[in-house]
Amino acid sequence: MSSETIGQQRLARRMARGAEFLGCEVAILGGAMSWVSERNLVSAISNAGGFGVIACGAMTPALLDAEIAATRALTDKPFGVNLITMHPDLFELIEVCKRHQVSHVVLAGGLPPAGSLDAIKANGARLICFAPALALAKKLIRSGVDALVIEGMEAGGHIGPVSTSVLAQEMLPEIADQLPVFVAGGIGKGQAIAGYLDMGAAGVQLGTRFVCATESIAHANFKKAFIRASARDAVASVQIDARLPVIPVRALKNAGTEAFTVKQREVAQKLDEGQVEMAEAQLEIEHYWAGALRRAVIDGDVENGSLMAGQSVGMVKDEAPVAEIIATLMAEAAEALNARAQ
Ligand SMILES: Cc1cc2nc3c(=O)[nH]c(=O)nc-3n(C[C@H](O)[C@H](O)[C@H](O)COP(=O)(O)O)c2cc1C
């Protein structure tokens, strides 16, 4: 036997299924983050033994094509591509993934549209979907997805209403024996990874924890905001008028957050006064944050841009190489498992 500690052996055993599914050493997915999860961060995560995922976001098929090729040039390890179901060119994007023989496609943004599941799987790729509730998880399993991510409302970006701990308790005992399930949202330390693995997870997905990686191209201002922030600064967007739906997004509070509230009030008032039609008013709200994540991540406008971040942001203390972040998480998880009875 090697000099591995009992904790490391237990961790390797608990991660074996997830790692085998992903084709990597460590069952930690780098959750796709629009603008952040591009060639540099994705290849760094895969090179460090984890599983990087390119965030396609609103990229055109040509841009995705170039991003996959550039990522491949930086790593010979497997990585995935995250596609958003609402993208108008979804099927072209699936074709791009096929051309590059991308091994794993993650579909975000709701149930897979008709035909997309078959198109992805026909390519030989493995399909990972988000399951926001048990009933939907069962439906997705029946339709043939290969793995699921369950993501709680502690996460950064677009969120559902239920916390990770509740989703894990409700869903893992029911589905973890049927396919690999990865737990996401609010994970900042290895102790939590050990906990979810013990509950039956095949692995985990982290986003916020990787934003300040040395390899991440996020603007220095964006990284600084993360390093300064505590958990309570990462708040979900608030809807103030029942007529004007706001999709909840978790992000750090800034001037843009305040301005969004003012905007909603103004638009609601215009509606009251009959100055705008409902559809136009709703679009004005929907488009408010358009381009805002790019403004913050790429241009460094941390006042008015969107600082999408999860509650685990309080555990991001400094900039560090991806390999070091993963090594720390694994050491913490192994230490926690060392203390287990078996
Ligand atoms: C800045 C940022 C951008 C994100 N963009 C996306 C995205 O484009 N697609 C997606 O499926 N998830 C997106 N997410 C969610 C992550 O993939 C991941 O599931 C989430 O960050 C996990 O929770 P954590 O932040 O608590 O680790 C984003 C998260 C952040 C923080």
Image (cartoon, rainbow, N blue to C red):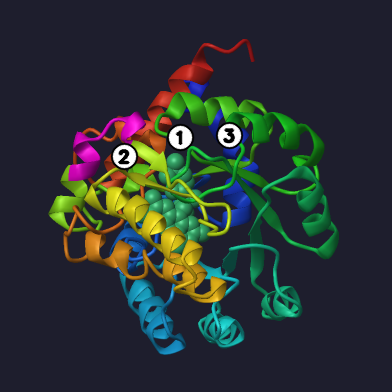
Q: Amino acid at mark 2?
A: Ile
Q: Amino acid at mark 3?
A: Ser
Residue 34's quadrant in the figure?
bottom left
Q: Residue at x 47, y 43 (%)?
A: 155
Q: Judge by depth and name the residue closer to the eye, 42 or 133.
A: 133
Indicate yes or no: mark 1 CB to ligand 1 under 8 Å: yes
Between disc 3 and disc 2, whose residue precedes?
3
Q: Is residue 229 magenta?
A: yes
Q: Categorize mark 1 by other alpha carbons within 10 Å: few (<14), some (14-19), many (20+).
A: many
Report helix, strand or loop for mark 2. Answer: helix
Q: Is residue 32 visible?
A: no
Label 3 vs label 2, nearer the camera: 3
Left or right for 199, reference 86: right
Q: Decide: marks 3, 2 in contact (CB < 8 A)?
A: no
Residue bounds of the magenta highlight: 225-233
Q: Amino acid at mark 1?
A: Ile
Residue 301's quadrant in the figure?
bottom left
Q: CA distance from mark 3 to mark 2?
A: 24 Å
Q: Position of residue 145 (x, y in %)?
A: 74, 61
Left or right for 288, reference 229: right
Q: Is residue 332 visible?
A: yes
Residue indicated by mark 3: 163
Residue indicated by mark 1: 187
Residue indicated by mark 2: 325
Task: Locate the C terminus and report the quarter of the image it occupies.
Answer: top right
> Predominant secondary structure in magenta?
helix
Q: CA distance from mark 2 to mark 1?
A: 13 Å
Q: Categorize mark 3 by other alpha carbons within 10 Å: few (<14), some (14-19), many (20+).
A: some
Q: Position of residue 39 (x, y in %)?
A: 33, 68
Q: Is residue 242 magenta?
A: no
**10 in relation to 154, above or below:** above
Label 2 vs label 1, nearer the camera: 1
